[in-house]
Amino acid sequence: MSIKKSMLALAVAAMATMAFASSAMATDGKFRDVTGTAEMGVNRELHAVGWAKFTTAKGSYTCHVTSIVKSSSSSSTSASTGTVTKFDVPDTTKCTGTGLLNGCKLKAHKPENLPWHVTVTDNGRIDITGNIVIHIEYSSCLAPTVTLTFDEIQLTALGTKNKRTVTGTENRIGDTAALNEEIAGFEIDSSKVDEVPGPVTKGTAHVKDPFGGETTEEATPTGEFELTDADRCTWEISAS
């Protein structure tokens, strides 16, 4: 069940990245319009939709998700930062699990300690930091509750080359976007954090069983998110 929760956390992270983020090991980048001149403006909201998944040694859980990130910086020439203000699962019937989470139904989910901080880095990634916690409740499941925690979640921008079918989106995202290339969406980078290469992004899932016991599992997030029409292919990440 920890997986389900982790999946939710992942989704949140992905959405936040869509707004802006910075990696602790990289210098700050800029999130600006494709002409390189327009300002994002303070409190502009970026919306994204897609899927998020968390996997542990005992199983995995996947859901369709939506997310909102709000900008904190206004200038296209200064480092871009923002906050993840919302992470949601609009249709719980579209969540599916494997292993121990097979057949589990999402009863309730609550992202805690919002907003989470996001920053854009000059290597084209987005870093989400803070006390990232998601509390999940299940029905028809061996684990009634799961709490997922992360210190950091990193995302990579996606462009439109080699578009593919992506669950929960309109299938308009493709390969990784290079610096100064229009962004169509994001993916959770579960293979590296802060460095290239780096350690696998992992979180901790605290899973409670029906008898009141609790186990701690390592969870790995994955996911892909597409920006909605107003912002798809409008923005790019620049190192300067």
Image (spheres, rainbow, N blue to C red):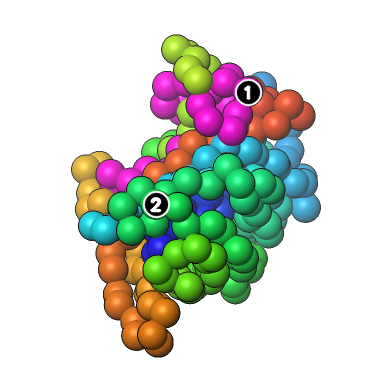
Q: Position of residue 14 (x, y in %)?
A: 52, 46
Label disc, if present, on residue 102 of the rendered structure: 2
CA distance separating discs 1 and 2: 27 Å
Q: Position of residue 170 (x, y in %)?
A: 63, 23
Q: What segment is highlighted magenta in the picture?
A: 166-194
Residue at left offset 41%, top offset 63%: 1
Q: Position of residue 33 (x, y in %)?
A: 67, 29
> Mark 1 sits on what residue?
170
Q: Position of residue 234 (x, y in %)?
A: 67, 25
Task: Name the amino acid type tagged 1.
Answer: Glu
Label 2: few (<14), some or many (≥20) within 10 Å?
Answer: some
* Image side of residue 43 versus residue 115, left or right: right
Q: Is residue 170 magenta?
A: yes
- Farthest residue, direction front: 140
Question: Under tag 1, what secondary structure?
Answer: loop
Residue 102's place in the image compared with 151, above or below, is above
